[in-house]
Amino acid sequence: MKFNDRWADTRQCVRFFYTRGLQRIDGAIFFDAVKLPPARCAWDSTMEFIDTLGDLERERFLKVQRLRERGIEPYPPRTARTHTIAAVRALDERGEDPGVVTLVGRMTANRWTGKITFADLRDGTGRIQLFLRQDNLGAETYKHFLKDYDLGDFAQATGSLFKTKTGELSVQVTELVMLAKAVAPMPEKFHGLTDKETRYRQRYLDLMTNEETRGVFRARQRIVTAMRAYLDRNDFIEVETPVLQALYGGALAKPFITYHNELERNLYLRIADELYLKRLLVGMFERVYEISKDFRNEGVDATHLPEFTMMECYQAFGDLSDMIKVVEDLFVECATAAGGALQITYGEHQVDLTPPFARVAMRDAILEKTAIDIYADDTFDALKARIAEKNLRVEPQMNWGKLVEKLFGAYVEPTLIEPTFVVDFPTEISPFAKKKPGDPRVTERFEIYVAGAEYGNAFTELNDPADQWQRFMEQQGNRARGDAEAQQMDQDYVQALKHGMPPTGGLGMGIDRLTMLLTNQHSIRDVVLYPQLRT
RNA sequence: GGGCCGCUAGCUCAAUCGGCAGAGCAACAGCCUUUUAAGCUGCAGGUUCAGGGUUCGAUUCCCUGGCGGCUCACCA
């Protein structure tokens, strides 16, 4: 512990306040710690708190105590805001003068020139300049401002609007109130906070410092709102399905396992909403959707997090072509909400999101890029050879569908820059999609690709209970051969299908990745407020 | 999981070949009544991620560990 003069000063100040505050004003007690009561009191715990502070924080905490000594509460319970900063600016732009206004916000910059200080005040809606002049505030208040206010403090400023000689809208402050003293200093104002770990772990610092970060998350909110509005408008009903599931399913992925004490059994965190949502169609809801977190116990990188946000929607009496329209509409709605334009920049790519989007069959796309016909007889070994060229891992249990998927991912996916629907996915990797009429090797399924990445996945949903049962059985076989992502048999789901599910189109879209695309962010961690980091 | 890179003051970053650990911002003591990353003077601020090793001497070289980033693999 450092016992420098500043620190001793803070101690004295704190002790002074609390002895007085606890009605123990007594010269003997005041400076004689031995006579303080042995029981823990506010003074003790405040002392312990001070011991946890760094030097700069102690300096600021000293100001907290100084304010209290003078009868000023540094954390008052209420404010008297009359306008947001954005509202004041809007009035000004219309040429209206609101008269005396009271604004609240965080002080983010000070430029002082003697008996005048220009300060920046920022609230959730914008930034405005405060003009603090000794002549307006009075010498004592002005000195109090200089001594006790720091960058980062929340303050309330009252005054009238005027333009400085450089033409900047400012508040001529006549009254200043501390709303919340910041004990810890803000990150540096010019470079801001760049350390990525700190930005993710202490997101509040990132948000208070970096305008771009706030912009990304506001855009994300607009994207989700636009998506919901579109689905609501088109008679999709928003529902909630279980996160904790006795049997997980609906996607090919590894789950998180948790344990229920009273039930004495394992439960799984859902990997998809699909099977529960489609049961609702059996129950005769015609259009349902859910926007929620899914969990997959897999790798963490720039496009994968263990928890991520998914939108799934299902439309009874619809099919793949209806989902194509939903996807195209959603891209238009969300892009408009996020940035206003359908022509977007993503990294080095310029992309036009104006429908209709291109369509290509998986076979044709692979044929074009690799000269391999996945339908030819010798396909299996040829696929393996080409995949080996790419240094991709070929597991012995991989079937034709998995090899096709690998090849597609390596040779085709990165080349799909303009929005493209890829159709006709292998049946083996599409256990919930209806087979294509006349060609049981592939399904009525598409994925939408933009800028080399996938943003959505849709099927004409499989509603034949016998076929579904067989697909589950095949998955069981895959599992037996070591495929950790294979589906478990879901008898109850098959039972539901036995009661009849209407012909249905279904779609899943990753909200995080869509937000990445529309905000030009290249790590999923930058579009999730609190991303899981390694540890 | 593999490879590469990084971790220095509250923040952003320096430190030559292994030779006294520095600057800007923030803070502190002052000056300055229209500033825009304000300016000026002064002062203070460090477990150089942790532990070990080599060395007269380690921020620097070596080893181990921690945390992170990028990338490859895995994966929706």
Image (spheres, coloured by chain):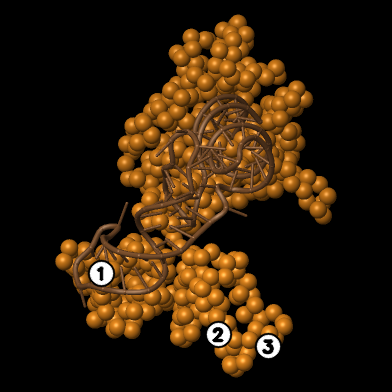
User: Mark 2: few, some, or many residues within 10 Å (few <14, many ≥20)?
Assistant: some
Q: Nearer the viewer, residue B43 or B28?
A: B43
> Label 1's element?
strand
Measured from the top left, where is residue A193 in percent x and y? 44, 51
Please state if A8 lies on the left or on the right of B51 as rendered. Answer: left
| Chain letter, orange in picture | A
**Foreground residue among A446 and B11:** B11
In contact (CB < 8 Å): disc 2 and disc 3: no
* Disc ID at residue A113: 1
Residue A506 sits in quarter: top right
Tell me: A147 left or right of A401: left
> Is residue A62 visible in the rendered structure shown here?
yes
Q: How many marks?
A: 3
Quarter of the image for residue A519 reads top left
Farthest residue toward the bottom?
A26
Amino acid type, residue under disc 3 in the picture: Lys
Q: Is residue B36 above or below residue A226?
A: below
Answer above or below: position of A267 versus A7: above
Task: Using the image, name the chain to which the residue with label 1 belongs.
Answer: A
Residue B13: image location, x then y, percent = 42, 45
Element under disc 3: helix
Task: Check the image and report above or below for A535 versus A376.
Answer: below
Query: Which quarter of the figure is the N terminus of chain A placed in?
Result: bottom right
Question: Mark 3, residues whose alpha carbon is within 10 Å: few (<14), some, or many (≥20)?
Answer: few
Q: Which residue is mark 2?
A: A16
Q: Quadrant of the C terminus of chain A?
A: top right
Q: Which residue is mark 3?
A: A35
